[in-house]
Image (cartoon, rainbow, N blue to C red):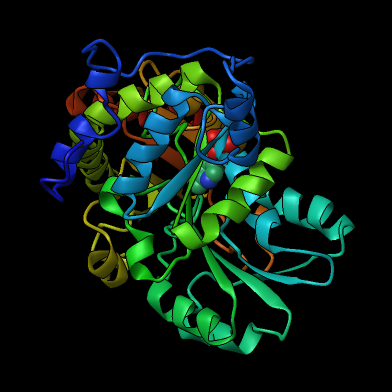
Amino acid sequence: MPRTTDRDDTLLCHLGTHPDDNHGIANPPVYHASTIHFPTLARLEEAGRDRFTGVTYGRYGTPTTFAFEEAVAMLSGADKAMALPSGLAAIAVALTTFLKAGDHLLMTDSVYEPVRKLCDKILAAQGILTDYYDPTIGAGIAALMRGNTRIVYVESPGSLTFEVQDIPAIAAAAHGRGAVVVADNTWASPLFGKPMNLGADLVLESATKYVAGHSDVMIGFIAMRDAEYEAVKRQGHGLGYGAAPDDCYLALRGLRTMGVRLRRHQETALALARWLGGRPEVEHVIHPALPDHPGHDLWRRDFTGASGLFSVVLKPMPRPALAAMLEGMRLFAMGYSWGGYESLILPVDPAAVRTARPWTMPGPVLRIHAGLEDPDDLIADLSLGFERLQRSGLHA
Ligand SMILES: *Cc1c(COP(=O)(O)O)cnc(C)c1O
Protein backbone atom coordinates (compact mmCIF):
# COMPACT_ATOMS: atom_id res chain seq x y z
CA MET A 1 0.00 0.00 0.00
CA PRO A 2 1.36 3.47 -0.84
CA ARG A 3 2.26 5.27 2.39
CA THR A 4 -0.25 8.12 2.31
CA THR A 5 -1.30 8.21 5.94
CA ASP A 6 -0.27 7.30 9.48
CA ARG A 7 -3.83 6.98 10.70
CA ASP A 8 -4.46 3.50 12.01
CA ASP A 9 -8.07 3.16 10.88
CA THR A 10 -7.05 3.73 7.29
CA LEU A 11 -4.02 1.49 7.61
CA LEU A 12 -6.19 -1.32 9.01
CA CYS A 13 -8.21 -1.32 5.81
CA HIS A 14 -5.32 -1.35 3.38
CA LEU A 15 -2.19 -2.86 4.90
CA GLY A 16 -0.90 -6.06 3.35
CA THR A 17 -3.24 -6.04 0.37
CA HIS A 18 -1.59 -6.48 -2.99
CA PRO A 19 -4.49 -6.84 -5.42
CA ASP A 20 -2.28 -6.18 -8.44
CA ASP A 21 -0.29 -9.31 -7.61
CA ASN A 22 -3.45 -11.42 -7.22
CA HIS A 23 -5.73 -10.88 -10.22
CA GLY A 24 -7.21 -7.80 -8.54
CA ILE A 25 -8.59 -9.87 -5.67
CA ALA A 26 -9.12 -7.62 -2.65
CA ASN A 27 -7.89 -9.99 0.05
CA PRO A 28 -4.54 -11.74 -0.29
CA PRO A 29 -5.42 -15.37 -1.06
CA VAL A 30 -4.51 -18.32 1.16
CA TYR A 31 -1.42 -19.93 -0.30
CA HIS A 32 -1.06 -23.47 1.01
CA ALA A 33 2.40 -24.78 0.37
CA SER A 34 5.12 -27.12 1.36
CA THR A 35 7.03 -27.48 -1.93
CA ILE A 36 7.96 -24.45 -4.00
CA HIS A 37 9.17 -25.13 -7.58
CA PHE A 38 12.30 -23.45 -8.91
CA PRO A 39 12.61 -23.39 -12.69
CA THR A 40 16.36 -22.86 -12.85
CA LEU A 41 19.40 -23.91 -10.87
CA ALA A 42 20.20 -20.23 -10.32
CA ARG A 43 16.78 -19.58 -8.74
CA LEU A 44 17.10 -22.65 -6.53
CA GLU A 45 20.50 -21.50 -5.30
CA GLU A 46 19.26 -17.97 -4.76
CA ALA A 47 16.37 -19.28 -2.64
CA GLY A 48 18.78 -21.28 -0.52
CA ARG A 49 20.71 -18.12 0.26
CA ASP A 50 17.60 -16.05 1.02
CA ARG A 51 15.44 -17.97 3.46
CA PHE A 52 14.34 -14.81 5.25
CA THR A 53 12.38 -12.94 2.63
CA GLY A 54 11.67 -15.19 -0.34
CA VAL A 55 9.14 -17.93 -0.92
CA THR A 56 11.38 -20.97 -0.57
CA TYR A 57 9.64 -23.59 1.56
CA GLY A 58 6.20 -23.74 3.15
CA ARG A 59 7.49 -23.62 6.70
CA TYR A 60 9.21 -20.30 6.04
CA GLY A 61 5.98 -18.67 4.95
CA THR A 62 3.96 -17.94 1.84
CA PRO A 63 2.66 -14.61 0.47
CA THR A 64 -0.29 -15.00 2.91
CA THR A 65 2.14 -15.03 5.85
CA PHE A 66 4.08 -12.09 4.43
CA ALA A 67 0.90 -10.02 3.95
CA PHE A 68 -0.02 -10.49 7.61
CA GLU A 69 3.52 -9.72 8.74
CA GLU A 70 3.67 -6.58 6.65
CA ALA A 71 0.42 -5.32 8.16
CA VAL A 72 1.23 -5.95 11.82
CA ALA A 73 4.76 -4.58 11.45
CA MET A 74 3.48 -1.27 10.13
CA LEU A 75 0.69 -1.02 12.71
CA SER A 76 3.19 -1.68 15.49
CA GLY A 77 5.52 1.05 14.25
CA ALA A 78 8.13 -1.59 13.51
CA ASP A 79 10.23 -2.37 10.44
CA LYS A 80 9.45 -6.07 10.34
CA ALA A 81 7.29 -8.74 11.92
CA MET A 82 7.39 -12.49 12.17
CA ALA A 83 4.18 -14.52 12.39
CA LEU A 84 4.23 -17.47 14.78
CA PRO A 85 1.77 -20.29 15.55
CA SER A 86 0.64 -18.75 18.87
CA GLY A 87 1.31 -15.90 21.24
CA LEU A 88 3.27 -18.23 23.48
CA ALA A 89 5.40 -19.32 20.51
CA ALA A 90 6.15 -15.64 19.86
CA ILE A 91 7.26 -15.25 23.48
CA ALA A 92 9.42 -18.38 23.34
CA VAL A 93 11.14 -17.22 20.16
CA ALA A 94 11.65 -13.66 21.42
CA LEU A 95 13.23 -14.88 24.67
CA THR A 96 15.40 -17.64 23.24
CA THR A 97 16.74 -15.44 20.43
CA PHE A 98 18.61 -13.34 22.97
CA LEU A 99 19.20 -15.65 25.95
CA LYS A 100 21.94 -18.22 26.29
CA ALA A 101 23.25 -20.29 29.20
CA GLY A 102 24.47 -18.06 32.01
CA ASP A 103 22.19 -15.16 31.10
CA HIS A 104 19.73 -13.45 33.42
CA LEU A 105 16.14 -12.48 32.58
CA LEU A 106 14.05 -9.95 34.49
CA MET A 107 10.40 -10.93 34.14
CA THR A 108 7.38 -8.93 35.26
CA ASP A 109 5.46 -10.66 38.04
CA SER A 110 2.07 -10.26 36.35
CA VAL A 111 3.20 -11.96 33.15
CA TYR A 112 0.80 -14.25 31.28
CA GLU A 113 1.10 -17.29 33.49
CA PRO A 114 2.30 -20.00 31.04
CA VAL A 115 5.40 -17.85 30.48
CA ARG A 116 6.43 -18.67 34.06
CA LYS A 117 6.57 -22.37 33.11
CA LEU A 118 8.68 -21.53 30.09
CA CYS A 119 11.10 -19.59 32.30
CA ASP A 120 11.13 -21.76 35.41
CA LYS A 121 11.32 -25.10 33.60
CA ILE A 122 12.56 -24.87 30.05
CA LEU A 123 14.86 -21.86 30.26
CA ALA A 124 16.08 -22.82 33.73
CA ALA A 125 17.12 -26.25 32.40
CA GLN A 126 19.23 -24.41 29.81
CA GLY A 127 21.06 -22.44 32.48
CA ILE A 128 19.06 -19.23 32.13
CA LEU A 129 18.02 -17.60 35.40
CA THR A 130 14.75 -15.69 35.73
CA ASP A 131 14.00 -13.17 38.47
CA TYR A 132 10.46 -11.83 38.78
CA TYR A 133 10.02 -8.15 39.59
CA ASP A 134 7.18 -5.99 40.85
CA PRO A 135 5.46 -4.69 37.70
CA THR A 136 5.14 -1.22 39.23
CA ILE A 137 8.89 -0.96 39.90
CA GLY A 138 9.56 1.67 37.19
CA ALA A 139 13.11 3.08 37.23
CA GLY A 140 13.78 0.96 40.33
CA ILE A 141 14.44 -1.92 37.93
CA ALA A 142 18.02 -0.60 37.72
CA ALA A 143 18.75 -2.07 41.16
CA LEU A 144 17.80 -5.57 39.93
CA MET A 145 19.95 -5.47 36.81
CA ARG A 146 23.04 -7.66 36.85
CA GLY A 147 26.02 -7.73 34.57
CA ASN A 148 24.48 -10.71 32.75
CA THR A 149 20.90 -9.35 32.50
CA ARG A 150 20.15 -9.75 28.83
CA ILE A 151 16.36 -9.17 28.68
CA VAL A 152 13.92 -7.08 30.66
CA TYR A 153 10.41 -8.29 29.86
CA VAL A 154 7.33 -6.13 30.32
CA GLU A 155 3.63 -6.83 29.94
CA SER A 156 1.46 -3.79 30.46
CA PRO A 157 -1.17 -3.86 31.74
CA GLY A 158 -0.30 -7.17 33.41
CA SER A 159 -2.34 -10.36 33.17
CA LEU A 160 -5.24 -10.81 35.64
CA THR A 161 -4.39 -7.76 37.79
CA PHE A 162 -3.70 -5.08 35.15
CA GLU A 163 -0.74 -3.24 36.67
CA VAL A 164 0.38 -0.52 34.25
CA GLN A 165 4.14 -0.44 33.80
CA ASP A 166 6.35 2.61 33.30
CA ILE A 167 7.89 1.21 30.11
CA PRO A 168 9.96 4.33 29.24
CA ALA A 169 11.60 4.31 32.70
CA ILE A 170 12.20 0.55 32.59
CA ALA A 171 13.56 0.73 29.04
CA ALA A 172 15.95 3.57 29.95
CA ALA A 173 17.37 1.53 32.83
CA ALA A 174 17.57 -1.66 30.72
CA HIS A 175 19.26 0.05 27.79
CA GLY A 176 21.71 1.75 30.15
CA ARG A 177 22.98 -1.73 31.03
CA GLY A 178 22.83 -3.15 27.53
CA ALA A 179 19.69 -5.29 27.97
CA VAL A 180 16.97 -5.83 25.38
CA VAL A 181 13.39 -4.83 26.26
CA VAL A 182 10.69 -7.27 25.16
CA ALA A 183 7.06 -6.15 25.53
CA ASP A 184 3.85 -8.19 25.44
CA ASN A 185 1.27 -5.80 23.99
CA THR A 186 -1.66 -8.21 23.71
CA TRP A 187 -4.07 -6.30 25.98
CA ALA A 188 -3.83 -3.02 24.09
CA SER A 189 -3.33 -4.40 20.56
CA PRO A 190 -1.34 -2.25 18.12
CA LEU A 191 -4.25 0.18 18.00
CA PHE A 192 -4.22 1.30 21.62
CA GLY A 193 -0.58 0.64 22.50
CA LYS A 194 2.73 1.21 20.68
CA PRO A 195 5.49 -0.04 22.98
CA MET A 196 8.12 0.45 20.25
CA ASN A 197 7.56 4.18 20.75
CA LEU A 198 8.02 3.78 24.51
CA GLY A 199 11.42 2.13 24.26
CA ALA A 200 10.65 -1.57 23.69
CA ASP A 201 13.00 -3.32 21.26
CA LEU A 202 10.71 -6.24 20.48
CA VAL A 203 6.94 -6.20 20.74
CA LEU A 204 5.00 -9.40 20.68
CA GLU A 205 1.33 -10.15 20.72
CA SER A 206 -1.06 -13.00 20.90
CA ALA A 207 -3.00 -12.17 17.73
CA THR A 208 -5.30 -14.97 18.85
CA LYS A 209 -7.04 -12.23 20.86
CA TYR A 210 -8.16 -8.96 19.27
CA VAL A 211 -6.39 -9.23 15.93
CA ALA A 212 -8.04 -12.49 14.86
CA GLY A 213 -10.94 -11.52 17.08
CA HIS A 214 -13.37 -14.40 16.55
CA SER A 215 -12.30 -17.08 19.05
CA ASP A 216 -11.26 -19.47 16.30
CA VAL A 217 -7.58 -18.87 15.53
CA MET A 218 -4.28 -19.38 17.35
CA ILE A 219 -1.56 -17.03 16.09
CA GLY A 220 1.09 -14.67 17.39
CA PHE A 221 3.68 -12.26 16.07
CA ILE A 222 6.86 -10.45 16.98
CA ALA A 223 7.35 -6.90 15.67
CA MET A 224 10.86 -5.46 15.59
CA ARG A 225 13.41 -3.23 13.89
CA ASP A 226 15.48 -4.40 10.93
CA ALA A 227 18.45 -4.84 13.29
CA GLU A 228 16.81 -7.70 15.22
CA TYR A 229 14.93 -9.29 12.34
CA GLU A 230 17.48 -11.75 11.06
CA ALA A 231 18.32 -13.17 14.49
CA VAL A 232 14.64 -13.57 15.40
CA LYS A 233 13.77 -15.18 12.08
CA ARG A 234 16.71 -17.55 12.29
CA GLN A 235 15.56 -18.63 15.76
CA GLY A 236 11.90 -19.10 14.75
CA HIS A 237 12.90 -21.01 11.64
CA GLY A 238 15.44 -23.07 13.54
CA LEU A 239 12.80 -24.18 16.02
CA GLY A 240 10.52 -25.17 13.15
CA TYR A 241 7.83 -22.60 13.79
CA GLY A 242 5.61 -21.37 10.99
CA ALA A 243 2.17 -19.81 11.28
CA ALA A 244 -0.45 -21.69 9.25
CA PRO A 245 -1.63 -19.93 6.07
CA ASP A 246 -5.34 -20.16 6.96
CA ASP A 247 -4.61 -18.60 10.32
CA CYS A 248 -2.59 -15.78 8.74
CA TYR A 249 -5.50 -15.15 6.39
CA LEU A 250 -8.05 -15.07 9.22
CA ALA A 251 -5.87 -12.83 11.35
CA LEU A 252 -5.41 -10.39 8.48
CA ARG A 253 -9.15 -10.45 7.88
CA GLY A 254 -9.69 -9.77 11.57
CA LEU A 255 -7.48 -6.70 11.37
CA ARG A 256 -9.83 -5.01 8.91
CA THR A 257 -12.55 -4.65 11.54
CA MET A 258 -10.38 -4.41 14.63
CA GLY A 259 -10.77 -0.63 14.87
CA VAL A 260 -14.55 -0.72 15.22
CA ARG A 261 -14.54 -3.87 17.33
CA LEU A 262 -11.99 -2.57 19.78
CA ARG A 263 -13.82 0.69 20.41
CA ARG A 264 -16.99 -1.22 21.13
CA HIS A 265 -15.12 -3.61 23.47
CA GLN A 266 -13.72 -0.53 25.20
CA GLU A 267 -17.08 1.19 25.60
CA THR A 268 -18.86 -1.90 26.88
CA ALA A 269 -16.06 -2.85 29.27
CA LEU A 270 -16.16 0.62 30.81
CA ALA A 271 -19.94 0.47 31.15
CA LEU A 272 -19.69 -2.93 32.87
CA ALA A 273 -16.79 -1.80 35.07
CA ARG A 274 -18.69 1.27 36.28
CA TRP A 275 -21.83 -0.73 36.91
CA LEU A 276 -19.91 -3.42 38.79
CA GLY A 277 -18.24 -0.73 40.90
CA GLY A 278 -21.66 0.17 42.29
CA ARG A 279 -22.60 -3.38 43.32
CA PRO A 280 -22.57 -4.34 47.01
CA GLU A 281 -21.00 -7.76 46.20
CA VAL A 282 -17.98 -6.05 44.63
CA GLU A 283 -14.91 -5.12 46.66
CA HIS A 284 -12.91 -3.52 43.88
CA VAL A 285 -12.88 -3.09 40.10
CA ILE A 286 -9.47 -3.26 38.39
CA HIS A 287 -9.60 -1.33 35.13
CA PRO A 288 -6.75 0.96 34.01
CA ALA A 289 -9.14 3.49 32.46
CA LEU A 290 -10.90 4.09 35.79
CA PRO A 291 -9.41 7.07 37.65
CA ASP A 292 -8.97 5.08 40.89
CA HIS A 293 -6.62 2.59 39.22
CA PRO A 294 -3.09 3.10 40.63
CA GLY A 295 -1.64 3.07 37.08
CA HIS A 296 -4.28 5.34 35.59
CA ASP A 297 -1.92 8.27 34.94
CA LEU A 298 0.61 6.02 33.20
CA TRP A 299 -2.20 4.48 31.17
CA ARG A 300 -3.32 7.95 30.07
CA ARG A 301 0.22 8.88 29.16
CA ASP A 302 1.13 5.74 27.23
CA PHE A 303 -2.08 4.29 25.73
CA THR A 304 -4.70 5.67 23.38
CA GLY A 305 -7.49 3.40 24.58
CA ALA A 306 -8.52 0.52 26.79
CA SER A 307 -9.56 -2.85 25.48
CA GLY A 308 -12.37 -5.03 26.79
CA LEU A 309 -10.54 -7.03 29.46
CA PHE A 310 -10.54 -6.16 33.16
CA SER A 311 -11.00 -7.79 36.55
CA VAL A 312 -13.30 -7.43 39.48
CA VAL A 313 -12.57 -8.49 43.06
CA LEU A 314 -15.64 -9.74 44.91
CA LYS A 315 -16.19 -9.67 48.64
CA PRO A 316 -15.23 -12.98 50.27
CA MET A 317 -18.00 -15.56 49.92
CA PRO A 318 -18.56 -19.31 50.12
CA ARG A 319 -17.58 -21.22 46.99
CA PRO A 320 -21.14 -22.47 46.28
CA ALA A 321 -22.29 -18.85 46.05
CA LEU A 322 -19.66 -18.13 43.42
CA ALA A 323 -20.58 -21.32 41.56
CA ALA A 324 -24.25 -20.35 41.62
CA MET A 325 -23.40 -17.03 40.01
CA LEU A 326 -21.04 -18.37 37.35
CA GLU A 327 -22.89 -21.53 36.37
CA GLY A 328 -26.14 -19.83 35.47
CA MET A 329 -24.82 -17.13 33.15
CA ARG A 330 -26.66 -16.95 29.84
CA LEU A 331 -24.35 -14.68 27.85
CA PHE A 332 -21.02 -14.75 29.70
CA ALA A 333 -19.24 -18.02 29.03
CA MET A 334 -16.60 -19.41 31.37
CA GLY A 335 -13.54 -20.06 29.24
CA TYR A 336 -9.93 -19.20 28.56
CA SER A 337 -8.59 -16.71 26.07
CA TRP A 338 -10.42 -13.49 25.15
CA GLY A 339 -10.55 -10.87 22.41
CA GLY A 340 -13.36 -12.56 20.50
CA TYR A 341 -16.84 -11.20 19.90
CA GLU A 342 -18.39 -12.93 22.91
CA SER A 343 -18.32 -12.02 26.58
CA LEU A 344 -16.40 -14.22 28.99
CA ILE A 345 -16.16 -14.46 32.74
CA LEU A 346 -13.37 -16.41 34.41
CA PRO A 347 -12.52 -16.96 38.07
CA VAL A 348 -8.76 -16.44 38.42
CA ASP A 349 -6.31 -16.78 41.29
CA PRO A 350 -3.54 -14.16 41.19
CA ALA A 351 -2.29 -15.26 44.64
CA ALA A 352 -1.24 -18.62 43.16
CA VAL A 353 0.94 -17.12 40.43
CA ARG A 354 2.72 -14.15 42.04
CA THR A 355 6.14 -14.38 43.59
CA ALA A 356 7.51 -10.81 43.65
CA ARG A 357 4.42 -8.85 44.56
CA PRO A 358 2.05 -10.98 46.62
CA TRP A 359 -1.67 -10.72 45.96
CA THR A 360 -3.45 -10.25 49.25
CA MET A 361 -7.09 -9.45 48.55
CA PRO A 362 -9.12 -12.29 50.09
CA GLY A 363 -12.21 -12.33 47.83
CA PRO A 364 -12.59 -14.18 44.52
CA VAL A 365 -11.27 -12.43 41.41
CA LEU A 366 -13.24 -12.58 38.17
CA ARG A 367 -11.63 -11.66 34.88
CA ILE A 368 -14.21 -10.25 32.53
CA HIS A 369 -14.02 -9.87 28.79
CA ALA A 370 -16.66 -7.50 27.44
CA GLY A 371 -17.82 -8.84 24.10
CA LEU A 372 -19.80 -7.16 21.35
CA GLU A 373 -23.26 -7.96 22.73
CA ASP A 374 -25.67 -5.22 23.77
CA PRO A 375 -24.26 -3.81 27.04
CA ASP A 376 -27.69 -3.71 28.70
CA ASP A 377 -28.13 -7.43 28.10
CA LEU A 378 -24.72 -8.08 29.63
CA ILE A 379 -25.57 -6.02 32.70
CA ALA A 380 -28.86 -7.90 33.04
CA ASP A 381 -26.97 -11.21 32.87
CA LEU A 382 -24.55 -10.08 35.61
CA SER A 383 -27.42 -8.73 37.67
CA LEU A 384 -29.20 -12.10 37.61
CA GLY A 385 -25.87 -13.70 38.49
CA PHE A 386 -25.61 -11.56 41.62
CA GLU A 387 -29.18 -12.52 42.55
CA ARG A 388 -28.24 -16.21 42.35
CA LEU A 389 -25.12 -15.48 44.37
CA GLN A 390 -27.13 -13.72 47.09
CA ARG A 391 -29.74 -16.47 47.27
CA SER A 392 -27.13 -19.21 47.48
CA GLY A 393 -24.99 -17.23 49.93
CA LEU A 394 -27.88 -17.08 52.36
CA HIS A 395 -28.14 -20.87 52.35
CA ALA A 396 -24.43 -21.56 52.59
C1 LIG B 1 -3.26 -15.24 25.53
C2 LIG B 1 -2.02 -14.51 25.84
C3 LIG B 1 -0.78 -14.96 25.40
C4 LIG B 1 -0.61 -16.28 24.69
O1 LIG B 1 -1.20 -16.26 23.46
P1 LIG B 1 -1.69 -17.62 22.71
O2 LIG B 1 -1.97 -17.11 21.35
O3 LIG B 1 -2.85 -18.12 23.47
O4 LIG B 1 -0.52 -18.54 22.76
C5 LIG B 1 0.32 -14.18 25.65
N1 LIG B 1 0.23 -13.03 26.33
C6 LIG B 1 -0.94 -12.58 26.81
C7 LIG B 1 -0.98 -11.30 27.56
C8 LIG B 1 -2.11 -13.31 26.59
O5 LIG B 1 -3.25 -12.87 27.08
Q: Is 297 displayed left or right of 220 in the figure?
A: left
153 over 249 or under it: above or below:
below
Residue 17 horizontal/vertical position (percent): 26, 26
Q: Which of 84/2 is in front?
A: 2
Quadrant in the picture for residue 368: top left
Image quarter where the N terminus lies is top left
Q: Quadrant of ligand 1?
A: top right
Q: Which image quadrant is residue 272 in?
A: top left
Q: Nearer the viewer, residue 49 or 129?
A: 49
Label count reads 0
Residue located 25% across and 37% down the image: 262
Q: Residue at x 56, y 59 (%)?
A: 110
Residue 308 visible somewhere in the drawing: yes
Is 49 situated left or right of 137 in this image?
Answer: right
In this rendered view, identify the residue nearer to me: 23 or 292. 23
Residue 192 x, y percent position in the rendering: 27, 51
Q: Nearer the viewer, residue 326 or 183?
A: 183
